[in-house]
C-alpha cells in the first residue's frame, strides 16, 4: 500500500505542472471537473488482486514506474505516420501524437454540413455546449481510479459529432501514435463520439507505437448513440509489447440504436479493456466482438457489461483468444436483464485456444436476469487445436505447420469477418498469416 500512495502522490504532484500548461484554459468550466477528479483520485486506491473485478489482473508492474504525463506534441515525420495507415482504405483521418492532435497529418474532406470530426481540446477551448453536456457523464470518475486520473488530466482526444439524419459514408480513422523517445510517458486520450437521431458513422480507434518503448496509455471513450443511429466501432490495439494499456469505453444507447464494436488486441504487456453499454430505450441492438492474440508474458483482460434496462433489445457478444508462450487471458462478461426488460435476446460467448502448456485463461461469462420473458445464453471454452481436425488435414498431405495455420485462421474468422471494412479484414488476415504461418 505504501508504493500505491507514492504513485498516487506522484500523479497529484504532476497536476500542478499540468494546470500551468493550460494557461487560459484553466478558467474554462471543464477545469472544475478536472479539479474534482484529482481530489477524488487522491482518495481512491489502485486495484489489487484482492478486488473482485481485478482478481486475475495484477497491475503492480504499472505502479513500479513514475510515468510522466505528456504535456506537448512531439514532432514526427509524415513517413512515420504513413506506416500506420491502410493504403486501401478511403477514410477521414485524425492523428494524435503522444495524445495531442496533429493537424498537419489529419484530413477530413467533404464531411456533411454540421458534422464535426476533430479534437476535443479545440471544443473545450471554444466552450462547446455539446462537450459540456456529455463529457464525463457516462464514464463516472468517482469510483474508478484510472478514470479519475484521465478526467483530471483531460487535455485532448478525438471528438466526433454527427447531427441528426447525417450519414458519413467513409470511416473515420483515429490514429493514436506514441513516440516515447526514451521517456516513460503517460498518454491519456479522452474521446467523445456523439451520433444524433437517424445518423450513421464508422469509427476506427487505432493505437500504435513508433518503437518498443515503455509507456502507459490510459484511455477513456464515451459514445452516445442517438435514437435509430448506427455506430460501427473498431478498436485496434497494436502498441509496444512493453507498454501498458488501460481502456474504458462507455456506450449510451437510445431507442432503436445499433452499436457494434470489434476489438482486436495485439500489443501491450498488460492490457485491460472495459466495455459497458446501457439500453436507455426500446429496440436497441449492441454487438461486442473481440480477438486477442497473446504471446510471451502478455496479459489481456476484457471486462464487459451490457445493461438491458429496457425491453425489446438484443445483444450479441463474442470474444476469442489465441494464447502462446506464458501469456494470460482474462474475460469477464456480464449481461444484466432488469425486471422491466421483457423480450430481451442476449447471447454471450468466450472461446480460447491455448498453443502452449504455460498459457492460462480465466473466463467468467455471467447472466443476471430479473425478467421472465427473455432468451439468453452464455458459454466459454478453453482448449487446444482440435486433434481430429489436425489429423484430417495432415491425412490429406497438408504439413503440420500449415494445418495449424488453417485451423487458427478458421478459429479467428468468426470475429474477423464481422468487420465490415475490407481493407481492415485484409490487414487482420495478414497479421494472422505473419504470426502463425511459420
Image (cartoon, rainbow, N blue to C red):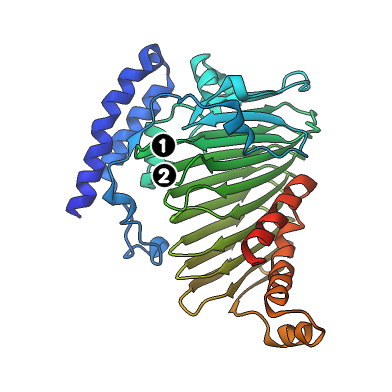
Q: Nearer the viewer, residue 395 or 117?
A: 395
Q: Please report the residue visible at 62 percent of the width from the left and 35 percent of the height from the top.
A: 174
Is residue 284 at all visible to an observer of this figure? no
The relative height of residue 408 versus residue 113 in the rendered view (above or below) is below
Q: Nearer the viewer, residue 314 or 24?
A: 24
The label number, if any, that marks residue 213 in the structure image? 2
The answer to which quarter of the image holds residue 254 is: top right
Distance of label 1 from label 2 (alpha carbons):
6 Å
- Report the quarter where the C terminus lies: bottom right
The answer to which quarter of the image holds residue 345 is: bottom right
Name the residue tied to disc 1.
180
The relative height of residue 345 versus residue 204 in the rendered view (above or below) is below
Is residue 434 at all visible to an observer of this figure? yes
Q: Nearer the viewer, residue 405 or 373?
A: 405
Q: Please report the residue visible at 30 percent of the width from the left and 57 percent of the height from the top.
A: 60
Residue 173 rendering spot, x and y as whole percentages:
67, 35
Which label's residue is closer to the chain start, 1 or 2? 1
Instruction: Tell me whether circle 1 and circle 2 mark residues in contact (CB < 8 Å).
Output: yes
The relative height of residue 414 versus residue 424 in the rendered view (above or below) is below
Q: Please report the residue visible at 61 percent of the width from the left and 41 percent of the height from the top.
A: 205
At numbered mark 2, what does the secondary structure look like: helix, strand or loop? Answer: loop
Residue 96 rendering spot, x and y as whole percentages:
54, 30
Residue 86 rendering spot, x and y as whole percentages:
71, 40
For this orientation, the residue located farthest to the left is 2
At numbered mark 1, what does the secondary structure look like: helix, strand or loop? Answer: loop
Q: Nearer the viewer, residue 27 or 169?
A: 169
The relative height of residue 375 versus residue 70 in the rendered view (above or below) is below
Q: Residues within 10 Å of mark 2 (few under 14, many from 20)?
A: many
Q: Residues within 10 Å of mark 1 (few under 14, many from 20)?
A: many
Amino acid at each position: 500500500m505504501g508504493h500505491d500512495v507514492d504513485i498516487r502522490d506522484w500523479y497529484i504532484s504532476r497536476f500542478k505542472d499540468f494546470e500551468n500548461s493550460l494557461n487560459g484554459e484553466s478558467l474554462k468550466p471543464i477545469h472544475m471537473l478536472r479539479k474534482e477528479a484529482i481530489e477524488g483520485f487522491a482518495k481512491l486506491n489502485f486495484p489489487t488482486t484482492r478486488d473482485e473485478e481485478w482478481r486475475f489482473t495484477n497491475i503492480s508492474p504499472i505502479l513500479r514506474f513514475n510515468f510522466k504525463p505528456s504535456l506537448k506534441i512531439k514532432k514526427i515525420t509524415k513517413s512515420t505516420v504513413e506506416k500506420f495507415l491502410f493504403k486501401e482504405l478511403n477514410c477521414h483521418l485524425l492523428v494524435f501524437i503522444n495524445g495531442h492532435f496533429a493537424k498537419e497529418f489529419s484530413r477530413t474532406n467533404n464531411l456533411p454540413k454540421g458534422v464535426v470530426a476533430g479534437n476535443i481540446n479545440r471544443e473545450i477551448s471554444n466552450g462547446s455546449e455539446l462537450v459540456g453536456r456529455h463529457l464525463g457523464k457516462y464514464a463516472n470518475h468517482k469510483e474508478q481510479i484510472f478514470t479519475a486520473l484521465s478526467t483530471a488530466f483531460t487535455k485532448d482526444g478525438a471528438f466526433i459529432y454527427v447531427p441528426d439524419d447525417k450519414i458519413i459514408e467513409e470511416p473515420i480513422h483515429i490514429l493514436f501514435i506514441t513516440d516515447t523517445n526514451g521517456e516513460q510517458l503517460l498518454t491519456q486520450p479522452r474521446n467523445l463520439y456523439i451520433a444524433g437521431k437517424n445518423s450513421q458513422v464508422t469509427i476506427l480507434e487505432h493505437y500504435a507505437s513508433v518503437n518498443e518503448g515503455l509507456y502507459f496509455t490510459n484511455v477513456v471513450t464515451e459514445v452516445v448513440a442517438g435514437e435509430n443511429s448506427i455506430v460501427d466501432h473498431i478498436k485496434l490495439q497494436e502498441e509496444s509489447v512493453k507498454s501498458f494499456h488501460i481502456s474504458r469505453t462507455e456506450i449510451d444507447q437510445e431507442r432503436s440504436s445499433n452499436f457494434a464494436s470489434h476489438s482486436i488486441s495485439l500489443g501491450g504487456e498488460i492490457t485491460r479493456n472495459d466495455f459497458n453499454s446501457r439500453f436507455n430505450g426500446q429496440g436497441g441492438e449492441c454487438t461486442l466482438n473481440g480477438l486477442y492474440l497473446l504471446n510471451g508474458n502478455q496479459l489481456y483482460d476484457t471486462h464487459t457489461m451490457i445493461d438491458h434496462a429496457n425491453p425489446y433489445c438484443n445483444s450479441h457478444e463474442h470474444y476469442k483468444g489465441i494464447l502462446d508462450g506464458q501469456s494470460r487471458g482474462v474475460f469477464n462478461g456480464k449481461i444484466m436483464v432488469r425486471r422491466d426488460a421483457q423480450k430481451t435476446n442476449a447471447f454471450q460467448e468466450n472461446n480460447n485456444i491455448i498453443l502452449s502448456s504455460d498459457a492460462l485463461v480465466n473466463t467468467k461469462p455471467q447472466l443476471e436476469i430479473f425478467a421472465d420473458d427473455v432468451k439468453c445464453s452464455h458459454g466459454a471454452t478453453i482448449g487446444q487445436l482440435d486433434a481430429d481436425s489436425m489429423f484430417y488435414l495432415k491425412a490429406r498431405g497438408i504439413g503440420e505447420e500449415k494445418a495449424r495455420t488453417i485451423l487458427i485462421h478458421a478459429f479467428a474468422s468468426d470475429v474477423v469477418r464481422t468487420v465490415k471494412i475490407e481493407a481492415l479484414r485484409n490487414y487482420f488476415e495478414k497479421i494472422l498469416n505473419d504470426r502463425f504461418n511459420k
